[in-house]
Image: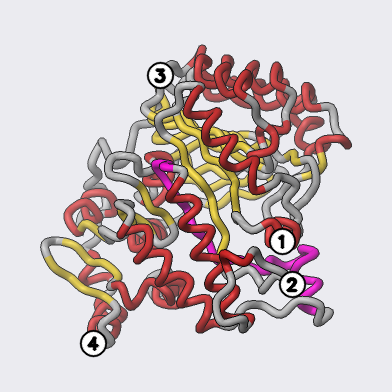
Amino acid sequence: MDNQKFDSELCPSDRRAAGLYVHIPFCEAKCRYCGFYSEPIKNHAPQRLVSAIIRELGQYDHIEAFQTVYIGGGSPSCLPAEQLLRLIREITSHWPKPEEFTIEVNPGQVNKSILSRLRTAGVTRISIGAQSFNSDELNFLGRRHSVGDIGRAVEMARRAGFENIGLDLIFAIPPSTSLPSTMLGTGRASDSTLDSWKYSLRSAIDLDVQHISAYALTYEEGTPLQKAVEAGEVAPVDEEIDRQMYETTIDELEKAGFKQYEISNFARPGFECKHNLNYWRNLPYIGVGPAAGSYWNGKRTLNIADVKKYIDAIEQETTVTDESETPDNTQIACETAVLNLRRRCGIILDEFENQTGFDAMKLFTEPIGRYRELGLIEATDGRLFLTRDALPIADSVLCDFSTT
């Protein structure tokens, strides 16, 4: 086995990287379910953070190009417009015209002016955090935008010149106390929940966007929502209903012309998120900002998850890295397999061997054999991939590919 056999396209040199991720850990108020690191912007001076991020970016001046750029959060759109544009100009002045430049926005935080300025500055893709088209569910989640804000944001983005617009949605939200009459089914809580989700899906489809991400609501440790569950104040949606909602997602979106290209992601042909596809290929990327992660020069690192400590470290010219590990070749192969299998195309066997030096069919003989018998994995046409039946329980299946 030749562990040094690498494809130059799959594993860029230290002068080129697959992607740049910038984490803006600010929001107007923390949503009840959010497990990502973020803090209310009112507690900080945003210009200091942007200055610190720009200084961290300077550490990567030697990188010739990024294939993709992604600004996420938090909520990047809660930054003052001039600070956000300052950051974007800094990125594009060093690394002009990436193949894809995405920014996440909150529907209630954008207007036509800022969207037009973002498009002019070089942003090519907008990801809108819609989450639900049911106002009761938005209130339950702690979202501060309205249902009407979602459609307005999409229309303004389109008028600003964006041709690649995505929506994020959440399903398996516990039943609301009241639903619009157009959503009501038999009246039972489970039916109302499923009807509400179908209504959100159809509303998203009707907006004629290019990309839809659909995630089940999770109860992250330490979040207000998880504490409410522990206190008996919130009952998670039944697993069977959760599964029905996911199956409905696949059926409805495929019927509407969206291709499922990853477990939770659907796109019209040609509009798959290139930045995230590079994550699922396990390609090197740089992350800057508080709590941002990187996979670079064979190391996985994580920045300090604290705005003040991060800024202090930058200003004092000390390291912002909080965690660092160097996976060995087998660990890299396992990580690559798990990430690849999230894609509907799965593991491309030749590509996997070129990238990792391992034959996936030999490295994972035992789990492949077991899951093939159960009808959860198929191997054909040079690919190893999850079947439709495996998708709702993908996390359980993928666990068996995380080690050898």
Of the image marks 1 and 4, the number of the one nearer the N terminus: 1
Q: Position of residue 240 (x, y in %)?
A: 50, 83
Figure quadrant of residue 220? bottom right
What percent of the width, then of the height, locates residue 62? Answer: 47, 20
Query: Taking 166 as reference, is 327 above or below it?
Result: below
Q: Secondary structure at mark 4?
A: helix
Give the residue drawn at x 72%, y 51%.
Answer: 143
Q: Residues within 10 Å of mark 2 (few under 14, many from 20)?
A: few
Q: Residues within 10 Å of mark 3 (few under 14, many from 20)?
A: some
Query: Earlier along the polypeptide chain: callout 4 or callout 2?
Result: 2
**Amino acid type, residue under disc 3 in the picture:** Lys
Instruction: Write the residue at 43% across / 41% down.
Output: 209
Picture coordinates of residue 350, whole percent (x, y): 17, 54
Q: Which residue is mark 4?
A: 373
Q: Determine which of the numbered discs, if any, sits on residue 97 in the image.
A: 3
Q: Nearer the viewer, residue 386 or 349?
A: 386
Give the residue type at disc 2: Thr
Whether residue 61 appears in this view of the structure is: no
Image: magenta residue range: 208-230
Residue behind mark 1: 136
| Contact check, label 1 and label 2, Cβ < 8 Å | yes
In the rendered structure, are the residues bearing label 1 and label 4 in contact, judged by CB atoms less than 8 Å apart? no
Residue underneath mark 2: 177
Q: CA distance from mark 4 to mark 2?
A: 44 Å
